[in-house]
């Protein structure tokens, strides 16, 4: 009998422990792959998942046989999904030296067994920020247009380019294998006046340096954008909502405004994201071609949409409306690669051609598309026919350009003298007639 009692007691103790141990898990510690270096005070975000919660978290940096604690959290959390952010680097651990190190994060489960999860990442300790040498040229800037800056970056760096307000433009190695870097950048149509572009370099460790370009804003020559009323007829409203919101219901005016605003923003984001499909070389060598047509609307025109005498919306038209004969041929403005050829909301049937280094041309409202994504096209090549698809009230081409996703005024790219003064004089553009 005593043996039976002892056995029962043992089972009452062992079985629950076995069940608990089986249910106990090791915390999963996730260190972002972007953590590759530590600078003065590099922000680190760690995510820990454990259904039992987390009892404690410790972060260490190991270098040359020594360990330095850079973060500790001993306040238990019952949440199954936790995120902590802390900084690590020279500022908090001055013993660190330039070179290789290891970042270690350990999390302990908040259960009886206290299992510990661990994540490690090899990192590089960077004690000094990169250094910039920027061209001393005077950059004449105009709203809605572009320019090119050259510079050098020395020391350790992971990212560089030009910042204009809240816009960032990438850097590229000089063409032809020449030393140095360059960046094509835009001064957006709605950028606050007197915003000064800044060349920047970052080493990925929280060490960001910048140097302002020498700029001149010719006041008398700045573009003046027009505002005009666009009358919306019943026929045009029905055409738009039936084509772009065929399954929608409700008030046609509300549907029209949603298309004109929310769909427009989504479409422009799709266009902007095409910057990621650019070539790392010039695909063109001659001035851009202007379609053989008349201009019906210019870049950055402000449009008030008037319906039955009432203003129902306002939008900015970021391109040129070019009209000629009905269903006229849509010509490639320059050599390049087709990166988009499909319907795109308000732009209707749309083609986007990449010309390298983030510069792209956009052709909208086409009645027919005769090229495919991936095709290489030549200056003047007919890629389709004009039309009135999307938010077009008549047969024409919506022609636009964008630089690293920011839509710009195309007119300077039609100008051989501007290209020579702003591009060819600063970087090598093979094949351009100097």
Image (spheres, rainbow, N blue to C red):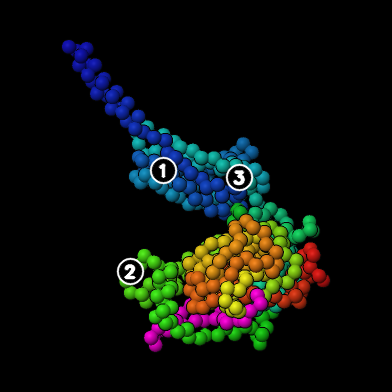
Residue 361 position, x and y percent, is: 62, 68
Along the polypeptide, which appears first: circle 2 or circle 1?
Answer: 1
Quadrant into which the C terminus falls: bottom right
The mark nearer the N terminus, 3 or 1, is: 1
Question: Is the C-beta separation of discs 3 and 1 under 8 Å?
Answer: no
Q: CA distance from mark 2 to mark 3?
A: 56 Å
Discs 2, 3 touching: Cβ within 8 Å: no
Q: Which residue is mark 2?
A: 249
Spot occupied by residue 300 in the image (x, y as percentages of width and height): 56, 79
Secondary structure state at the residue bearing disc 2: loop
Mark 2 vs mark 1: give the one in front.
2
Q: What is the spatial separation of the Cα atoms under label 3 and label 1, in whole angstroms? A: 23 Å
Q: Which residues are magenta?
A: 291-316
- Seen in the image, is 318 located left or right of residue 336? left
Q: Earlier in the sequence, mark 2 or mark 3?
A: 3
Residue hosting label 1: 49
Confirm whether the magenta stretch covers residue 433: no
């Amino acid at each position: 009998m005593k043996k039976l009692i002892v056995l029962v007691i043992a089972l009452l103790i062992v079985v629950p422990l076995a069940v608990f141990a089986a249910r106990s898990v090791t915390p999963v510690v996730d260190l972002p792959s972007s953590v590759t270096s530590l600078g003065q005070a590099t922000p680190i975000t760690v995510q820990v998942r454990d259904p039992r919660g987390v009892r404690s978290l410790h972060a260490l940096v190991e270098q040359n046989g020594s360990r330095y604690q850079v973060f500790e959290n001993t306040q238990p959390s019952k949440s199954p999904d936790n995120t902590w952010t802390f900084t690590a680097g020279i500022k908090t651990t001055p013993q660190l030296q330039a070179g290789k190190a290891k970042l270690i994060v350990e999390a302990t489960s908040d259960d009886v067994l206290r299992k510990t999860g661990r994540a490690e990442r090899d990192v590089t300790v960077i004690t000094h920020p990169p250094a910039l040498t920027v061209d001393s040229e005077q950059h004449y800037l105009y709203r809605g247009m572009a320019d090119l800056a050259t510079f050098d970056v020395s020391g350790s760096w992971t990212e560089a380019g030009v910042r204009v307000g809240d816009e960032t433009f990438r850097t590229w190695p000089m063409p032809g294998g020449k030393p140095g870097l360059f960046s094509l950048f835009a001064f957006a149509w709605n950028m606050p006046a007197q915003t000064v572009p800044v060349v920047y370099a970052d080493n990925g460790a929280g060490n960001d340096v910048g140097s302002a370009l020498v700029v001149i804003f010719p006041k008398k020559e700045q573009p003046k954008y027009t505002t005009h009323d666009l009358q919306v007829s019943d026929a045009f409203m029905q055409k738009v909502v039936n084509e772009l919101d065929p399954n929608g219901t409700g008030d046609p005016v509300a549907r029209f405004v949603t298309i004109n605003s929310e769909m427009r923003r989504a479409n422009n984001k799709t266009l902007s994201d095409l910057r990621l499909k650019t070539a790392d070389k010039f695909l063109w060598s001659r001035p851009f071609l202007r379609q053989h047509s008349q201009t019906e609307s210019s870049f950055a025109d402000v449009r008030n949409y008037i319906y039955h005498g009432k203003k129902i919306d306002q939008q900015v038209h970021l391109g040129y409306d070019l009209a000629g004969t009905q269903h006229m041929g849509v010509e490639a403005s320059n050599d390049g690669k087709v990166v988009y050829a499909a319907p795109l909301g308000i732009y209707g049937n749309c083609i986007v051609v990449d010309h390298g280094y983030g510069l792209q041309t956009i052709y909208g409202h086409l009645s027919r598309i005769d090229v495919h994504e991936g095709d290489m096209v030549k200056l003047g090549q007919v890629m389709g026919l004009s039309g009135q698809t999307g938010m077009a009230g008549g047969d024409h081409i919506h022609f636009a350009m964008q630089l690293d996703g920011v839509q710009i005024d195309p007119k300077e790219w039609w100008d051989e003298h501007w290209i020579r003064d702003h591009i060819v004089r600063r970087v090598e553009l093979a094949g351009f007639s100097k």
